[in-house]
């Protein structure tokens, strides 16, 4: 498979690939990292846990983009404004690149990765907020948020605080970084929605 063919395949199958990676990454971390440096293990663990979160959003049952387009943006189209390309680049950029990169940097200094559990907590809380906004009991990603992302992220923050890696549970720069990265997502979504409306206006004028 050539580079372009692999790239196109990955754009269609990244969520399935992430589910498999989540299993092997968790196994690797349990065997090789957990006993070596437990704090680093907890930070690196956030990546495969978030891949499971993505699996609920886009595989089982999937449909997060459709939910966002229809119930948040109030657009009838299932693949606009949030389409395949936006979803691919956001998830790959944040979860497949940024999280493991700073997780690996935490092996040099734990301070590089202390924002990651906060990121997973706020990502989970955002699904609760989306459900309230859409007035729906369920949206894809909510269950993993409730049973994994929020409680595990909170437990990691508590552990890091007790071990002295965090000066405070709530008042620290790492919380602000995790929150800020989560806030970038609705901002980016808002930009995509605005561009979508502009395209609609142009179509009507033609």
Image: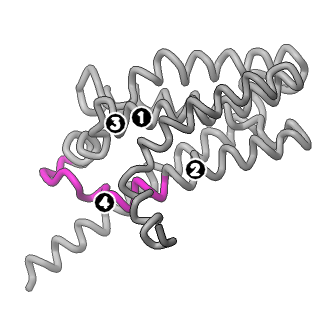
- Percent across and percent down for residue 195 are 31, 69
Q: Is 79 a magenta residue?
A: yes
Q: Which residues are magenta?
A: 74-90
Q: Nearer the viewer, mark 3 or mark 2?
A: 3
Q: Nearer the viewer, mark 1 or mark 4?
A: 1
Q: Secondary structure at mark 2?
A: helix
Tell whether 49 sits left or right of 141: right
Cα distance between the residues tagged 3 and 4 = 24 Å
Mark 1–mark 4 CB contact (< 8 Å): no
Find residue 55 and name its label.
Answer: 1
Q: Nearer the viewer, mark 4 or mark 2?
A: 2
Of callouts 3 and 4, the N-terminal one:
3
Query: Which residue carries the number 4 mark?
Result: 193
**Which residue shows up at 24% across the image and 44% down it?**
66
In this view of the protein, which residue sits in the foreground, 142 or 105?
Answer: 105
**Which residue shows up at 83% across the image and 40% down it?**
106
Instruction: Give the crowd class for mark 4: few <14, some 14-19, many >=20 residues within 10 Å.
Output: some
| Position of 77 relative to 198 (above/below) | above
Instruction: Give the crowd class for mark 2: few <14, some 14-19, many >=20 residues within 10 Å.
Output: some
Query: Which residue carries the number 2 mark?
Result: 94
Tell whether 103 sits left or right of 16: right
| Position of 9 relative to 25 (above/below) | below
Of callouts 4 and 2, the N-terminal one:
2
- Percent across and percent down for residue 88 are 43, 55
Q: Secondary structure at mark 4?
A: helix
Cα distance between the residues tagged 3 and 2 = 18 Å
Mark 3–mark 1 CB contact (< 8 Å): yes
**Which residue shows up at 39% across the image and 30% down it?**
141
Query: Which residue carries the number 3 mark?
Result: 59
In this view of the protein, which residue sits in the foreground, 175 or 27?
Answer: 27
Q: Nearer the viewer, mark 3 or mark 4?
A: 3
Mark 4–mark 2 CB contact (< 8 Å): no
């Amino acid at each position: 498979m050539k580079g372009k063919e692999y790239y196109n395949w990955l754009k269609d199958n990244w969520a399935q690939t992430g589910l498999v990676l989540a299993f092997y990454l968790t196994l690797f971390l349990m065997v090789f990292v957990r006993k070596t440096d437990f704090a680093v293990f907890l930070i690196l663990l956030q990546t495969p846990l978030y891949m499971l979160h993505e699996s609920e959003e886009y595989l089982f049952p999937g449909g997060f983009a459709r939910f966002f387009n229809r119930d948040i943006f109030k657009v009838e189209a299932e693949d606009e404004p949030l389409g395949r390309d936006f979803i691919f680049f956001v998830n790959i950029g944040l979860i497949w690149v940024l999280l493991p990169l700073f997780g690996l940097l935490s092996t040099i200094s734990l301070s590089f990765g202390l924002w990651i559990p906060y990121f997973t907590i706020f990502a989970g809380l955002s699904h609760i907020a989306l459900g309230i906004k859409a007035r729906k009991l369920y949206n894809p990603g909510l269950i993993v948020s409730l049973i994994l992302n929020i409680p595990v992220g909170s437990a990691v923050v508590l552990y890091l605080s007790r071990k002295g890696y965090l000066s405070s549970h709530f008042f620290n720069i790492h919380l602000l970084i995790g929150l800020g990265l989560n806030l970038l997502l609705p901002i980016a979504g808002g930009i995509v929605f605005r561009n979508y409306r502009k395209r609609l206006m142009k179509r009507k004028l033609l």
